[in-house]
Amino acid sequence: MKKNSAARNLTVHHAARTVRWGTDIVALVDGLAGFVGAGAGVASAVAEGPWVVSGARGRPVLMSRVTPVRRVTTLSLEGYSTLSGVRQYAFTETLGCFPMDPAGPQRPPSDQASRPAWGEADSETYRAIAPLAVPARSEQLAVLACLIPFAANDEFGFVEIGAGAGALSATLLECFPRASGLALNGSASMRSAAALRLARFGGRARVEHFELTSTEWLSALDGCECVLSSLVLHHLDDSQKRALYGEVCARVSEGGALLIADLVHPQRAEGRELFAATWDAEARAAALALDGGDRRFEQFVNAEWNLFRHPDPVDKPSVLVDQLRWLSDAGMPVVDCFWLRAGHAIYGGYMPRAKPGGLSFERALKGAEAALSEPA
Ligand SMILES: C[S@@+](CC[C@H](N)C(=O)[O-])C[C@H]1O[C@@H](n2cnc3c(N)ncnc32)[C@H](O)[C@@H]1O
């Protein structure tokens, strides 16, 4: 059991890795049983019983005298909020919890805007499940590399927005030996993983901190040739994405490109169900291929990673055709979608005078596989 060092004066008698909605006791805290639920279930659970802990994947937590809860989640909690008159606890780490100062800050459960979009617990979960949670991962990386409007021996600079553990940056540096890249990310553990993975590229790779929703980092894009991002921009809402596309276009060099891999919003219920089902199927097949069993797939399910099944206010995928229009409105004469599978699309735009690239898919795939095989 993992326990936060700040978890003092507290006995966690039992803590399940994963809990069944409304049935599993997660922890006995000061003699009280806790059940786990997710944000969306809170309102309906509020009137019903002893204790609920809300807030999946590192989001703020609500504990209250309510039960049962109806969804499955994992325990990766940080931050907190309370209902008035209810004792406060903060869950700062998976399975760790401790009493809070009653006079401490309070966050109303409905205040979604102030929730951290991504915490270290998410980074940890993502690193564990990415090999199956990202459909056709090496193919996605290879597709992005093939779309770069430069030849393999060209010298150019790129910025990766939200580079995570650096797999995409490593793929590009592998495939384009004279390119150099800046990998930006908000999570410290992700930056460490990226630094490790990119170390072999020496001065061609830099890893730096950024906060996606701020504007402070945008100058890092000035004059670079390519901007890429994989599975990050869905943390921005429509208007934030649109504004970012405008900033990229204003800053990236002529001849450059903005290339994005991300989840896209289905416009109809059939699309949502199809995205959800095909994502599950991809993840199950990948889990089976990885270690011959369902264990990793269960991790994916229990983490509620399939946002088409488990919408979360911090995930804000946008409609693909809207995004293509925003890219075009921002000044990119050529915009397109190049790949789409299980709700994950690869799309982007090219600046005026972008040349044809030259990297073969086979070469790119080798580069992606080499990048993924590096320790991170
Ligand atoms: C799903 S991971 C994708 C990582 C990587 N691009 C990949 O494809 O494997 C999302 C990444 O976005 C980063 N991220 C999310 N929200 C962020 C924010 N507001 N500011 C900075 N980074 C953020 C996370 O730290 C995480 O590394």
Image (cartoon, rainbow, N blue to C red):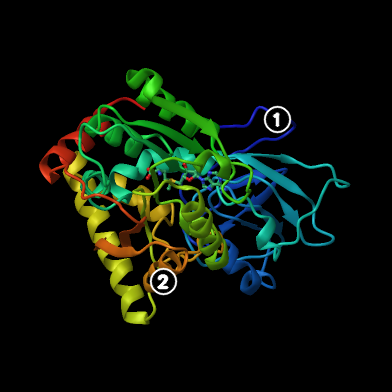
Quadrant in which the C terminus appears: top left
Give the answer, above or below, for where 139 lies relative to 12.
Answer: below
Judged left or right of residue 373, residue 239 is right
2 horizontally vs 356: left or right: right
Tell me where residue 281 sits by quadrant. bottom left
Front position in the image: 141 or 356 = 356
Identify whether 25 is placed above or below 370. Answer: below
- The residue nearer to you, when weighing 107 against 291, is 107
Name the residue at 70% across, 30% down. Answer: 6
Q: Is residue 342 visible?
A: no
Q: Residue flagged by tag 2: what amino acid is it?
A: Arg
Horizontal and vertical percent position of residue 309: 40, 67
SS assignment at label 1: loop
The residue indicated by pointer 1 is 6
Identify the mark nearer the N-term, 2 or 1: 1
Q: Residue at x 19, y 53 (%)?
A: 285
Residue flagged by tag 1: what amino acid is it? Ala
Residue 208: where, in percent of width, then height?
Answer: 52, 31
Front residue of 147 and 4: 147
The mark lying in front, picked from 2 and 1, is 2
**Picture coordinates of residue 173, whole percent (x, y):** 29, 31
Question: Which residue is under mark 2?
Answer: 325
Q: Report whether residue 297 is seen.
A: yes
- Callouts 2 and 1 close, C-beta under 8 Å: no
For label 2, the SS is helix
Residue 54: quadrant of the picture: bottom right
Numbered tag placed on residue 123 in the rendering: none
Q: Position of residue 139 (x, y in %)?
A: 20, 48
Q: Dot 2, how many residues are within 10 Å of its Cα: few (below 14), some (14-19), or many (20+)?
A: some
